[in-house]
Image (cartoon, rainbow, N blue to C red):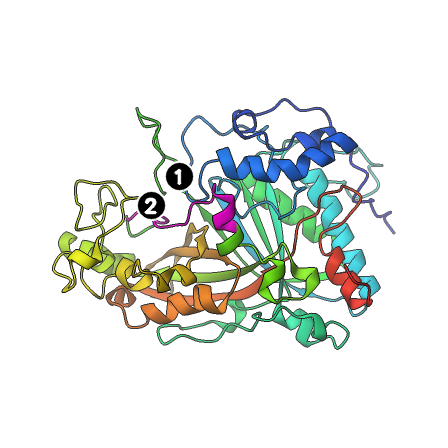
């Protein structure tokens, strides 16, 4: 029998900092590991939301580096308001743990692997008679490559464990079908979702295989979806742009400002005032949707009709009532009450009416495009890996999606999978583990 490898034993070398790192200050604590550095980690949360690019800005060619590091330590988990790199995936698992001790072991194992993979280091060389310590996909030295790994738990984790059920977040539920959905049961729900983002696809796949190997007795993979974000050329004025989806429109233009910490506290993060279990403070609700795009039909649709369906110009992303403006300009619906410029049933107008009531429904989008090959009917299997974070799932994604029911865009899209999850609070000390507050609550220990 082969000897198991301790997931926390891989050493981390002193890697040079990437350009993103120099711009944002991410990861200094993860590399240093000193107590002073750990204290700086909490402050790094503020820095990243003050100076980092927005979550849905398109990655710019020539900026990413294999040495880019995003600190995994912080009040909130990385991979939510941190800049979105060019590659991402969501993998959903069934959890086998049936006691608080077993759940703690799982979370500790995952945290140890996150700590190593997001910092990088040399892969141990084992006895050739044993399985290798690593897949070898990235070579003998692992580079961080802006890797983030974000852990979230599903309603079934609580519902199927009486000792955990009393601690389920108030708004966490099993995703139900909307009118335009054609949900595939094999692509829905899960006890645990793991979002993995990085500069390159090899890094996300390497991380997934590493996590699966380290938790082979604790997790069973149920489904996964990979995606990408188009990398754009640098603009002369360095003004950021939102990335485009496979329908050719910019995606995320109306996102709330992820660099505005007070806005993120209101829109994304669960606080003590939200009436959630105490262990959940600092977390967020994650909505995942696999949305297939009927691109062949879309590509045969007139250009003007496409713009009216979205309510934006296709070239620049500016709202239709400000065609010479910028994608971040807000439409003036008060001056266009009959929808002559921006149709009343356009996607952006239904999703966000730009009034006081709509402020309660804001969400932070972090989507990726996916391309899975060809369907059995000979059509391209392409679409959107939609990921959104919010402090209240009912007021956030569910409310917005209900506004979008029967919109004209539905003729060109079909949601086929996904689920709702609760993203666990972050940790600020390397001696802690993600999920520790939930395990403590299950044991009857107040956080």
Secondary structure mainly formed by the magenta segment = loop
Image disc number at residue 244: 2
Q: Is residue 183 left or right of residue 306?
A: right
Given residues 87 and 45, the one toward you in this image is 45
Verify whether residue 38 appears in magenta.
Answer: no
For mark 2, give the secondary structure: loop
Residue corresponding to mark 1: 58
Name the image quarter holding residue 228: top left
Mark 2 crowdedness (10 Å alpha carbons): few <14, some 14-19, many ≥20: many
Do labels 1 and 2 touch, CB within 8 Å? Answer: yes
Q: Is residue 333 left or right of residue 394?
A: left
Residue 91: horizontal and vertical position, in percent? 58, 57
Residue 281: horizontal and vertical position, in percent? 65, 58
Given residues 329 and 293, the one toward you in this image is 329
Q: Earlier in the sequence, mark 1 or mark 2?
A: 1
Residue 56: horizontal and vertical position, in percent? 42, 44
- First to last magenta residue range: 249-264
**View extreme (top): residue:** 16
Given residues 177 and 242, the one toward you in this image is 242
């Amino acid at each position: 029998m082969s000897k198991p490898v301790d997931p926390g034993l891989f050493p981390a070398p002193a890697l040079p900092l990437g350009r993103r790192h120099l711009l944002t200050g991410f990861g200094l604590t993860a590399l240093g590991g000193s107590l002073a550095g750990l204290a700086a980690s909490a402050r790094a949360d503020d820095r990243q939301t003050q100076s980092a690019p927005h979550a849905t800005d398109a990655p710019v060619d020539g900026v990413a580096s294999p040495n880019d590091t995003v600190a995994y330590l912080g009040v909130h988990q990385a991979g939510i308001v941190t800049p979105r790199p060019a590659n991402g995936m969501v993998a959903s698992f069934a959890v086998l743990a049936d006691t608080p001790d077993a759940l703690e072991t799982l979370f500790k194992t995952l945290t140890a692997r996150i700590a190593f993979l997001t910092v990088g280091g040399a892969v141990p060389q084992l006895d050739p008679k044993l399985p290798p310590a690593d897949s070898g996909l990235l070579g003998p030295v692992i580079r961080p490559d802006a890797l983030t790994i974000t852990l979230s738990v599903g309603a079934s984790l609580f519902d199927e464990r009486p000792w955990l059920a009393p601690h389920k977040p108030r708004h966490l539920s099993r995703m139900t079908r909307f009118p335009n959905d054609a949900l595939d049961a094999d692509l829905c729900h899960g006890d645990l979702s793991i979002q993995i983002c990085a500069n390159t696809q090899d890094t996300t796949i390497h991380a997934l295989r590493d996590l699966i190997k380290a938790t082979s007795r604790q997790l069973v993979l149920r489904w996964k979806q990979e995606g990408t974000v188009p990398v754009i050329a640098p603009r002369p004025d360095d003004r950021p742009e939102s990335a485009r989806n496979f329908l050719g429109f910019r995606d995320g233009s109306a996102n709330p400002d992820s660099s505005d910490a007070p806005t993120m506290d209101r829109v994304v993060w669960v606080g003590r005032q939200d009436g959630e279990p105490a262990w959940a403070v600092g977390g967020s609700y994650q909505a995942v949707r696999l949305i297939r795009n009927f691109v062949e039909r879309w590509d045969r649709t007139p250009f003007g009709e496409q713009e009216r369906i979205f309510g934006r110009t296709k070239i620049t992303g500016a709202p239709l009532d400000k065609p010479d403006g910028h994608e971040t300009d807000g439409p003036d619906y008060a001056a266009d009450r009959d929808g002559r410029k921006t149709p009343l049933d356009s996607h952006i107008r239904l999703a966000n009416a730009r009034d006081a009531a709509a402020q309660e429904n804001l969400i932070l989008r972090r989507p990726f495009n996916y391309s899975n090959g060809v369907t059995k009917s000979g059509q391209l299997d392409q679409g959107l890996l939609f990921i959104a974070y919010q402090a209240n799932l009912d007021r956030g994604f569910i409310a917005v999606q209900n506004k979008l029911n029967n919109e004209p865009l539905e003729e060109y899209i079909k949601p086929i999978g996904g689920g709702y999850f609760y993203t666990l609070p972050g940790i600020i000390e390397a001696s802690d583990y993600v999920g520790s507050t939930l395990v403590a609550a299950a044991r009857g220990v107040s956080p």
